[in-house]
Each structure stands twice: as C-alpha cells, then as structure tokens.
Image (cartoon, rainbow, N blue to C red):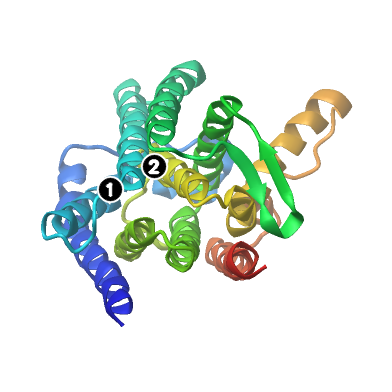
C-alpha cells in the first residue's frame, strides 16, 4: 500500500510542478524570442507553427529534478548508484539537447551541434555510465530469460550501452514532429518501465519513471494540439537517453524495443527511405519519419497522434507482459 501511495504521489507532484513551470516558462521564452524554425520540407500545414517557443523540455526536466531531489532529501526515496547513473544520463542528454537548441536559435536555422559533436558527448556519458556501473558490480551479460539468451559481453558491454543510449535518444528525437506525439508516447513508455522496475525490484528507478511520467503529463497540457510550446532537442534527447538507461539498468534492453516500438518504427522508416533512395532511387514513403507520410496522405495531425498513442499503449502493455511475466 505504501508503494502504491508513493507511486500516485510521484505522478501527482511531477504533474503539478510541470504545470506550474509551464505557466511561468512559456511567457519567458516568448519574451526572449526563443522560437522554433520550421523546415520548408514539412509542408504548409506546419508553417503556422513558426515561432512557437521551443526548449520546452526544460519544463519536465526541471520538474523531475526538483521532485526527485525533494524525495531524496526527505528520504522518501533511497539514493542508489543506479539512480546516480540515471541522473547523469538525464542531465547529460539535457545539456546536449540544450546546446543543440541554443545553437539552432542563435544561427536562426535548424543546424545546431554536428552529429560528431553530439556523438562525442554521448560517448563521454556512456563512459561515465559504464565506469559507475562496473564499480558497483553491474553485470555485463546480455540476458533475455524468455528467449533463454545469456551472452557475456565483458567490456564490450560499454559499447552496447553507448549504442542503446544513442539509438534511443535519436529515436525519440526523430519522432518529435507532431504536437504531443513524442511527449505522449514517452509518458506511456515511462509508465510501462515504472511498472516493470517496481515489479522486478528497482523501486528507485520506478519512482523516477513515475515522476518523469507525471512531469510529461504536465508538459502535455501545453504541448498537445495546438502546441503552445515544443520540447526541442532539449527534451527529446533527454527522454530517449533516459529511457535507454533505465532499460539497461533493469536488464530489459529487448523489452525497450517492444515498449518503444513506435519510436523504433519511426526510426526504421527513415533508414528504409534512405536506403531505397540511395540504392534504388525510389521512395518507399511519401515522407519520413513515417508520421509525415500519413500527413501527406491527408490525415489530420490530431488523428495521427491519437493512432500512434494507441499503438504505443498496446506495445507498452505487451512490453510489461514480456518484461515481467514471460
């Protein structure tokens, strides 16, 4: 009963803090003229969004940090090395995303950090992750009990950590193209990982996921159609990297592929399109990531988001069954 109370409290406090921060932050960003530049390739329907405040990820980043620090100081949640790693990944990716957004705004285009600059910083985060993980006796085997997989990776596990962090952060970043899409799917995914974490004995990670989920729900008050603010790379890289970190620490890396299935499909659509154009000189989709394909078919933005949320919810429930029961 105490754990259930903690869970409800975590979501509620995260939501309230984020809602309050949204009311404060949005007018500040407008006053500072921190607006989103819209690519000419996404179509006229998105042109009206030009100038909408970005860096909205700060809303759920600050609300999550404030809430978690409050819980730690009051000893409602114990501090663990796993929680320390999640904080490093969370803050590290937030800084990468913030720098990317800042440079984009300063240059007045969508070109912030280069791919190599982002990768270099993500490598540093992965090295710190691996060092703390190994120092505290973390296992270096890739295990999937359901499929009877137990593959010892040794120090190669450090590279595996990097691949998961880079892959998950970029997947959420690619999905962040419609109002409420990445935020809603992330909230669903973190609810799933919260339940998985609590069920397999990682209360610290479960509470963190619930706080972040509550903060995302508060952010969605302002981010659903028509969005008053965008999360920017500040938010999307943070969400993806943190999702990957929690999957690794709970040893549910394959479960991440199921829970974050919509993000995976979005990423695959870009890869398939790139290969098709370069090799066969033909397009498979009208536009990628795949949510833009449905826009080109004439679907309304709200309908695409709702459909993707439904698929995300079904996949999240499947991931819970796969990650805990099977």
Task: Give the residue furthest to the left.
Answer: 74
> Dot 2 surroundings within 10 Å: few (below 14), some, or many (20 or more)?
many
Q: Is residue 133 left or right of residue 295?
A: left
In percent of width and height, residue 136 lies at 38, 37
Task: Please tell me which residue is depicted at 61% across the width and 55% down the height of the picture.
Answer: 255
Which residue is at 58% across, 66% downward? 324
Numbered disc 1: secondary structure: helix
Image quarter of residue 71: bottom left
Residue position for label 1: 61
Disc 2, SS: helix
Marks 2 and 1: in contact by CB < 8 Å?
yes
The picture places residue 128, in percent across and down from the top left corner, at 38, 27
In the picture shown, does residue 204 fall above or below 87? Answer: below
Between residues 203 and 118, which one lies in front from this camera angle? 203
Q: Residue at x 17, y 37 (%)?
A: 32
| Residue 140: mark in rendering | none
State the residue lying farthest toward the right: 280
Q: Callout 1 environment at 10 Å: few (<14), some (14 to 19), or many (20+)?
A: many
Residue 314 appears left or right of 148: left
Quadrant location, the N terminus:
bottom left
Task: Please indicate, yes or no, whether residue 121 appears anywhere in the rendered image.
Answer: yes
Residue underneath mark 2: 238
| Residue 288 visible, this orientation | no
Residue found at the very far bottom of the displayed protein: 1
**Quadrant position of residue 285:** top right
Q: Identify whether 256 is placed above or below 188.
A: above
Quadrant in which the C terminus appears: bottom right
């Amino acid at each position: 009963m105490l754990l259930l109370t903690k869970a409800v409290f975590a979501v509620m406090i995260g939501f309230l803090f984020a809602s309050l921060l949204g009311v404060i932050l949005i007018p500040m960003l407008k006053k500072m003229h921190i607006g989103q530049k819209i690519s000419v390739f996404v179509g006229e329907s998105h042109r009206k969004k030009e100038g909408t405040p970005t860096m909205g990820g700060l809303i759920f980043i600050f609300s999550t940090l404030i809430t978690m620090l409050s819980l730690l100081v009051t000893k409602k949640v114990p501090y663990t090395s796993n929680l320390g790693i999640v904080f490093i990944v969370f803050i590290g990716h937030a800084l990468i995303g913030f720098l990317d957004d800042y440079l984009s705004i300063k240059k007045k285009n969508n070109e912030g950090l280069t791919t190599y600059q982002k990768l270099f910083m993500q490598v540093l985060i992965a090295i710190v992750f691996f060092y703390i993980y190994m120092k505290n006796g973390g296992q270096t085997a890739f295990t999937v009990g359901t499929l009877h997989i137990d593959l010892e990776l040794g120090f190669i596990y450090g590279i595996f950590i990097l691949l998961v962090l880079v892959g998950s952060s970029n997947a959420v970043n690619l999905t962040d193209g419609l109002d409420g899409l990445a935020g809603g799917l992330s909230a669903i995914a973190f609810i799933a990982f919260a339940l998985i974490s609590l069920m397999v004995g990682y209360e610290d990670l479960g509470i963190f996921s619930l706080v972040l989920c509550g903060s995302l729900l508060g952010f969605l008050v302002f981010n659903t159609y028509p969005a008053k603010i965008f999360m920017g790379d500040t938010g999307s890289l943070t969400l993806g990297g943190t999702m990957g970190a929690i999957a690794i620490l709970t040893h549910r890396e394959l479960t991440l592929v199921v829970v974050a299935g919509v993000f995976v499909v979005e990423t695959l659509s870009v890869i398939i399109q790139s290969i098709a154009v370069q090799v066969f000189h033909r397009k498979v989709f009208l536009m990628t990531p795949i949510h833009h394909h449905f826009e080109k078919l004439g679907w309304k933005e709200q309908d695409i988001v709702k459909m993707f949320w439904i698929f995300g919810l079904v996949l999240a429930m499947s991931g819970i069954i796969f990650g805990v029961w099977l």
